[in-house]
Image: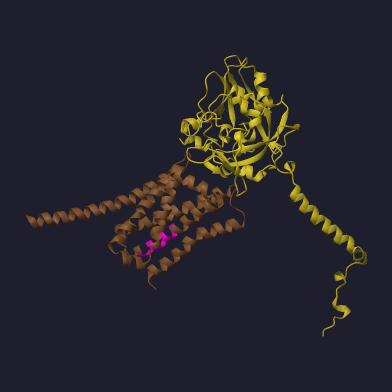
Chain colours: A brown, B yellow
Amino acid sequence: MKRILLIKRLLFLAALVPALRLAVKAYRMDLTANPVDYITDYTGDWTITCLIVSLGITPLRRLTGWNEVVKLRRMIGLFAFFYGTLHLLTWVVLDKFFDFAWMYEDVLERPFITIGMATWAILFVLALTSNTYSIRRLGRRWQKLHRLAYVAGICAVIHFWWLVKADITLPRRWAVLLAFFFSVRVWWTLRKRWAVSRKETLLQS
Amino acid sequence: MLIKKPSDFRSSEITPKDVWLRRREFIQASAAALVGAGAAGFLSDASAQGGGLAKLPNVKKSPLSVSDAPTSYEYITSYNNFYEFESGAGDGPKRKSGNFKPRPWKIAIEGEVAKPASYDLDEFIKPYQLEERIYRFRCVETWSAIIPWVGIPLKSVIDKVQPTSRAKFLKFTTMMDPKQFPMQRTNLLEWPYVEGLRIDEASHPLALLVVGLYGEILPNQNGAPIRLIVPWKYGFKGAKSIAKIEFVEKQPVNTWQIMARQEYGFYANVNPMVDHPRWSQRADRPLGGFRTKPTLMFNGYQDQVASLYNGLDLRKNF
């Protein structure tokens, strides 16, 4: 078996561990004195982790030249959608208990919830179009669409930032990482452009 | 078919005749013990719980207690906001306060009073009758609890220290000790933690200086050795590990107001009609549970405290 496939399978199992751990904790009633907040934070943390790791794949590939790593990206992105959906369901079922009027009001009036919903909506669209059929069907537009993953990452960090009371350590850490990945990409794009324009200048002279 | 011969049984396996004859008694006794244990589990009341800390003597019950069943000791002591130990609610304060030394403790009464002085905590408390007050507790973050505090009415302290006519507010200051409070070494909040009350609020019979929980001395994570509890206000008004109470003329600026004045005001009265800018305050979730319940005006103490705020715009003075 190819090494990358083995890594992919191991990573798949590893990414399921947080969900299994949460299920075991729930079974053992070990969810702290405030289970709803605990589950919300737990699933939220894993959503943002998967999302930002998935955004780190391309920079990692560029910086190390390890091209195969891109084969892990879709799966990690889908795990971000998986944990994001658990996070949303925690809110709908456990927190608001299907009180749709209340949820509607929250989405409209509370910016951190609005942006959280937007993040999930983006992840939903990206998950729907993550299959090979969509890639073929959408062609060049697929790549443009999937650049929304960066928007989702930024929205997720803002969502986190806006909900903390005083301690911004964690959201700031994600913001720095995201900014780093983004600047690596921007740097590469600019370099490519400069290289092209220099070639053109050289050809003209 | 295999038939065991008598010699296959060891004599030790044979039930003694007297026990055999009492077999019904034995079964009945076992059943009773089981039922008893079960019932004890269901009926365990406040007095049966605790954390094995020193018991407080001569605690009087109070008619100001609510009749709701108290939240378990375990929940009350493992879910705390105590930013001196860790940011955010959870079991961090419990895990990190193990080495905290709540005794010996000095408490200073300063400012506009007849005789400003510093007291040893136990000497300070001694003249007063301790009372158990089972109060509703509502955190600004929307979780809630029913807590059997033990304390002394703040009013009796105020009467004793004789405030001057210039004393309009009380300012409570938490102990400043970065060696014991790790987060005081960071700039997470502006230290030391400060809270304040109008003197008429502080003189309300419900305002309590708390020194105990479930009949025992206060655990470190809940604000040992002495803290403030104002049950109709959000929990953050209850300054913990108090080192100083000052009687002042001007309204103190409390810590959370310094941190985010658009979100946390001076009054911080529990009010389901006035949302936190980022979340709704209409409901709260009791610790240990999943479902929310509607939050009551002044946390259910409306009849007792509403008159303190006649003519005050509670939307502006949140």
Residue displayed at 41% across by 56% down: A123
- Residue at the outermost bottom position: B1
Q: Where residue A10 sits in the image (x, y, percent)?
A: 45, 65
Q: Where residue A45 sits in the image (x, y, percent)?
A: 47, 51
Residue displayed at 56% across by 30% down: B175
| Horizontal side of residue A191 vs B162, given as left or right | left
- Residue at the outermost left position: A205
Residue B297 part of the magenta-drawn span: no
Is A91 located above or below residue B93 in the figure?
A: below
- Quadrant housing the N terminus of chain B: bottom right
Q: Where residue B152 sits in the image (x, y, percent)?
A: 68, 28
Q: Where residue B258 sits in the image (x, y, percent)?
A: 47, 30
| Horizontal side of residue B189 vs B8, given as left or right | left
The reply to whether residue B287 is in sight is yes
Point out the stretch of residues depicted in magenta: A71-80
Count all numbered tags in the image, as a single digit: 0
Magenta stretch: helix, strand or loop mostly:
helix
Task: Compare residues B50 and B199 and report the one nearer the observer.
Answer: B199
Task: Compare residues B147 and A113 and report the one nearer the observer.
Answer: A113
Q: Quadrant of residue B268?
A: top right
